[in-house]
Image: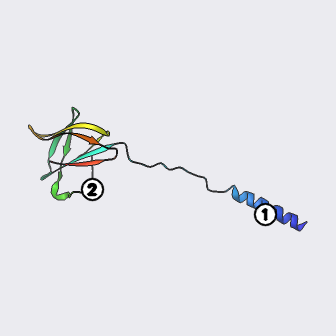
Amino acid sequence: MKKVILILSAVIFMTLLSGCGVGSYSVASGREDVAKLSFTATEKYAVEVVVDEQAFQVETVRQKAYKPGMRIKQTALNSLKLTPGSHHVVVKRGDSVLFEKNLFLSTGESKVIPL
């Protein structure tokens, strides 16, 4: 009788433990569905950036503070968030055009354009 109770207790105990297992969770991570543009120049100044005929006001990042391969602290003042894909970008300061080019931006890409 003791043996039956012991075996029955062990089976119940094992059943209870198996019900407390950790569930499986899925975690999705990836790149944000935007691309970013930043601009560097010898001095920090405001420029007008026209992307696909839509104008934005952006400040440049001083080149002395930026070295190629270095990350720029991207803020709303010095970076543009764009949809991935092909864009026609024109950078103006006053009446002069500093940069004009068709760019292709990938998802999550941060492109730095020296002026």
Q: Residue furthest bottom?
A: 2
Residue in the image at 44% along x and 49% along y? 29
Q: Amino acid at mark 2?
A: Arg
Labelled disc at residue 90: none
The numbered mark at residue 10 is 1
Q: How many marks?
A: 2
Q: Position of residue 23 (x, y in %)?
A: 61, 53
User: Considering depth in this image, is 64 or 90 the residue closer to the camera?
Assistant: 90
Badge 1 crowding class, 10 Å Cα cut-off, few under 14, some 14 to 19, many 20 or more, is few
Q: Which residue is mark 2?
A: 71
Where residue 19 sits, quadrant-wise, is: bottom right
Q: Residue at x 27, y 37 (%)?
A: 86
**Viewer-proximal residue among 58 and 67:** 67
Residue 67 image position (x, y, % from top left):
20, 58
Which residue type does callout 1 highlight? Ala
Residue 40 sits above or below residue 49 on the image: below
**Location of residue 79 in the rendering, given as x and y in whole percent from the top left corner:** 25, 46
Q: Residue at x 16, y 58 (%)?
A: 64
Quarter of the image for residue 81 reads top left
Q: Quadrant of the N terminus?
A: bottom right
Q: Position of residue 15 (x, y in %)?
A: 74, 57
Alpha carbon of mark 1 to alpha carbon of mark 2: how far?
59 Å
Left or right: 25, with 61 as reference point:
right
